[in-house]
Image: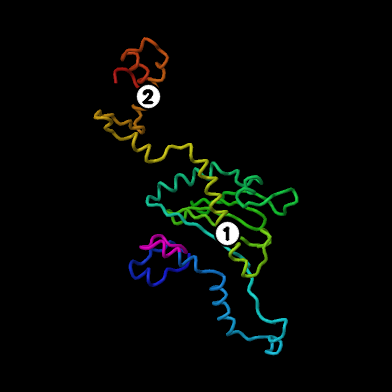
């Protein structure tokens, strides 16, 4: 994202997140400013700086049909998506689960899906996924030729997904600056696809809001339903013991249940 304009900052100063933005009073305006950083604006800024450099070509050569002049090429392009969590701890836990459950993202069939490119045995480079730990902050890396997708939990409160294209030829594009719009589409599409693949692996888990509802008492049709505190060892032992009597057509007595609960808790019946 580019730096917010003074109009946005006049209402409420955005809070920074290293090289990103953590919050802003007008996110839509901030995104609009970021989208305006296109090839035309970048070239205008660079040409302004190039005008101050000594020109090795004479005016006569520059006036010819060959148009001798400096050109602008893309050496590296990085496209990132930052998702800031209101509750950072609630975001760190699923990210660590994502790393464990998506180590196969480096397989050719997965990389082909993410980058939307056909991969054969003759495709140069290696398709791989790596988990790199720097200090206590793990990061997930997915490689395709000279390009890479990197994911990590930024400053303990945001999930950053970034696609870095080190060689535009990996995607059949040239290096000149006018290829930037096509590279943007590729980079942001790769970010979106990898998040979609990871979301599928997390659909089997209960959402936090659903888990909190089960752990809280509720009033349903005028009847109060007690909570099920799953963190309580006694409740867990009781639920496990009840499963032992599911297939008893004549039911069971409290005395039989107490014995199983005590055994699961590792205490005697006197306790």
Residue furthest to the left in view is 222
Q: Which image quarter: residue 17?
A: bottom left
The residue pinned by badge 1 equals 185
Q: Dot 2 lies on which element?
A: helix
Pick the residue in front: 91 or 132.
Answer: 91
Residue 169: percent from left, percent from top: 68, 61
Residue 126: percent from left, percent from top: 68, 51
Asked if residue 9 lies in the magenta stretch, the reply is: no
Pick the residue in front: 34 or 108.
Answer: 34
Residue 264: percent from left, percent from top: 39, 22
The magenta stretch is: 19-31
219 left or right of 162? left
The reply to whether discs 2 and 1 touch (Cβ–Cβ < 8 Å) is no
Which label number is shown at residue 218?
A: none
Residue occupying image coordinates x 68% and y 85%? 62
Looking at the rendered image, the quarter that the C terminus falls into is top left
Q: Dot 1 lies on which element?
A: helix
Residue occupying image coordinates x 35% and y 12%? 251
The residue pinned by badge 2 equals 239
Position above or below: 233 against 79: above
Asked if residue 28 lies in the magenta stretch, the reply is: yes
């Amino acid at each position: 994202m580019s730096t917010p304009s003074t109009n946005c900052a006049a209402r409420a100063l955005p809070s920074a997140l290293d090289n990103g933005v953590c919050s802003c009073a007008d996110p839509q305006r901030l995104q609009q400013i970021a989208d305006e950083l296109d090839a035309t604006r970048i070239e205008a800024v660079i040409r302004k700086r190039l005008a101050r450099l000594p020109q090795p070509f004479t005016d006569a050569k520059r006036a010819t049909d060959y148009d001798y002049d400096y050109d602008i090429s893309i050496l590296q392009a990085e496209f990132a998506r930052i998702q800031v969590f209101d509750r950072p701890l609630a975001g760190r836990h699923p990210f660590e689960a994502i790393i464990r459950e998506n180590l196969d993202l480096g397989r050719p069939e997965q990389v082909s899906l993410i980058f939307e490119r056909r991969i054969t045995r003759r495709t140069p480079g290696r398709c791989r996924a790596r988990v790199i730990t720097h200090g206590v902050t793990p990061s997930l890396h997915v490689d395709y030729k000279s390009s890479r997708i990197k994911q990590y939990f930024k400053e303990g409160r945001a999930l950053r997904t970034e696609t870095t294209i080190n060689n535009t030829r990996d995607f059949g594009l040239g290096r000149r600056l006018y290829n930037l719009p096509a590279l943007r589409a590729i980079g942001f599409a790769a970010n979106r696809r990898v998040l979609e693949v990871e979301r599928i692996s997390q659909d089997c888990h209960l959402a936090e809001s659903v888990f909190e509802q089960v752990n809280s008492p509720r009033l349903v049709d005028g009847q109060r339903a007690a909570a099920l505190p799953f963190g309580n060892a006694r409740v867990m032992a009781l639920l496990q013991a009840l499963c032992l009597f599911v297939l008893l057509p004549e039911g069971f007595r409290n005395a039989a249940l107490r014995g199983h609960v005590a055994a699961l808790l590792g205490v005697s019946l006197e306790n």
